């Protein structure tokens, strides 16, 4: 199968993980890196033996078919539209946009031009999460009835070198980490039909404790604790909480409760992790992982799947439609909190196709 030319716009913190993972997928041919800060692009290019160039050069390069958009969330739609208007497919970091209204323009533009939009997270393609999907589809827990999902921490100013964007419009714990949890749940049990939520902001400013900006104060413009309930189209009710205000907790990442058993799923921000099932009155039993990509960090896998999908003329799994649905769900928590009402979710994406259980390294078909 012929390689697919890839360009990357945005050479910040997350780009290193993408570039490290790229070498494990033979279909990907990284043709250039660009950033509004040329020094950032050059540093990454030097680190990985690649070419640094301007954004315009990347968009004009005829050998590039897919642009991976790793810019900050506020720029995802603007940069994505530039990519599509240059005649290239785009795979974006999460979230797809700051609002569903913005994100819809991206999908509409792609549809008009016959191009594809992909979006992170792709961690649901990891071996542990795919095994959870297989267990649920095979009835290992019976009919899923309920569940819980928790991401809670003290805040990213403890470790990120420049964390201000986490607390600006487009940030907050739900838009930052919610994509992993909600995407994983949609993969497991299907789309969300209705949301109720409540949000809070504990502080109006934060103090950075990481280097190099230690001691700097940053304003907090968004809710830093978001909680609520998702009613899935299947009827399952899942409670969720995402927070930058919790010093420590003991909740599991994701649990699903069925008519026959309960399932404990691993961290949806990882491709791997322990899976356990427990029946009423019995202890948790570890489950073997049956799918590939259950070790390591494969954080370009969604773009690799998009490349395979283009070559094989099939739907790609980490799709724009899935990301739009997840964004609509995340947005609904704030809307519900503001209005004091349930919010009906309009989008209804299909669950992505499962990966085969046996694949050669680097392959996705």
Image (spheres, rainbow, N blue to C red):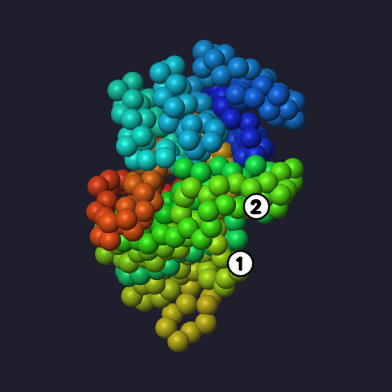
Residue 26 shows which numbered tag? none
* Above/below status of 212 relative to 58: below
Q: Which mark is residue 247?
A: 1
Which class describes the residues within 10 Å of circle 2: few (<14), some (14-19), or many (20+)? some
Residue 80 is left or right of residue 343, and the answer is right
Name the image quarter holding residue 272.
bottom right
Which residue is more in the foreground, 90 or 98?
A: 98
Q: Secondary structure at mark 2?
A: strand
Q: Dot 1 surroundings within 10 Å: few (below 14), some, or many (20 or more)?
A: few
x%, y% of residue 157? Answer: 64, 51
Q: CA distance from mark 1 to mark 2?
A: 15 Å
From the image, tell me which residue sits under label 2. Answer: 207
Relative to the observer, which residue lies in front, 28 or 215? Answer: 215
Horizontal placement of 134 versus 267: left or right? left
**Residue in view at x 60 percent, y 61 percent:** 154
164 displayed left or right of 188: right
Residue depicted at x 47% and y 50%: 222
Q: Earlier in the sequence, mark 1 or mark 2?
A: 2
């Amino acid at each position: 199968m012929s390689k697919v030319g890839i360009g990357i716009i945005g050479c910040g913190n997350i780009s290193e993980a993408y570039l490290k993972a790229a070498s494990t997928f033979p279909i990907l041919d990284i043709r250039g890196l660009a950033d509004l800060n040329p020094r950032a692009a050059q540093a990454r290019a030097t680190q990985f033996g690649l070419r640094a160039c301007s954004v315009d050069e990347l968009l004009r390069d005829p050998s590039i078919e897919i642009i991976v958009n790793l810019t900050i969330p506020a720029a995802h739609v603007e940069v994505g539209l530039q990519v599509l208007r240059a005649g290239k497919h785009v795979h974006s970091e999460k979230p797809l946009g700051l609002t569903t209204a913005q994100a819809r323009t991206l999908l509409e533009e792609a549809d008009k031009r016959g191009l594809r939009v992909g979006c992170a997270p792709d961690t649901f393609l990891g071996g542990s999460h795919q095994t959870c999907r297989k267990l649920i589809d095979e009835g290992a827990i019976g009919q899923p009835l309920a569940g819980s999902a928790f991401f809670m921490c003290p805040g990213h100013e403890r470790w990120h070198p420049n964390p201000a964007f986490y607390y600006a419009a487009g940030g907050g714990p739900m838009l930052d980490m919610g994509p992993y949890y909600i995407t994983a749940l949609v993969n497991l049990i299907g789309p969300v039909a209705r949301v109720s939520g409540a949000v809070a902001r504990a502080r109006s400013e934060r103090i950075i404790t990481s280097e190099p900006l230690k001691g700097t104060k940053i304003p907090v413009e968004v809710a830093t604790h978001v909680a609520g309930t998702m009613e899935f189209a299947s009827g399952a009710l899942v409670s969720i909480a995402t927070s930058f205000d919790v010093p420590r907790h003991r909740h599991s990442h994701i649990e699903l409760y069925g008519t026959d058993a309960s399932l404990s799923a691993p961290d949806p921000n990882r491709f791997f992790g322990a899976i356990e099932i427990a029946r009423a009155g019995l202890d948790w039993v570890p489950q073997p992982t049956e799918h590939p990509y259950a070790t390591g960090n494969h954080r370009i896998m969604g773009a690799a799947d998009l490349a395979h999908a283009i070559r094989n003329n099939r739907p790609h799994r980490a799709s724009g439609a899935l990301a739009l649905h997840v964004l609509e769900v995340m947005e609904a928590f704030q809307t519900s909190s503001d209005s004091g009402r349930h919010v009906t979710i309009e989008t209804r994406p299909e669950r992505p196709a499962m990966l085969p259980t046996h694949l050669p390294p680097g392959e996705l078909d």
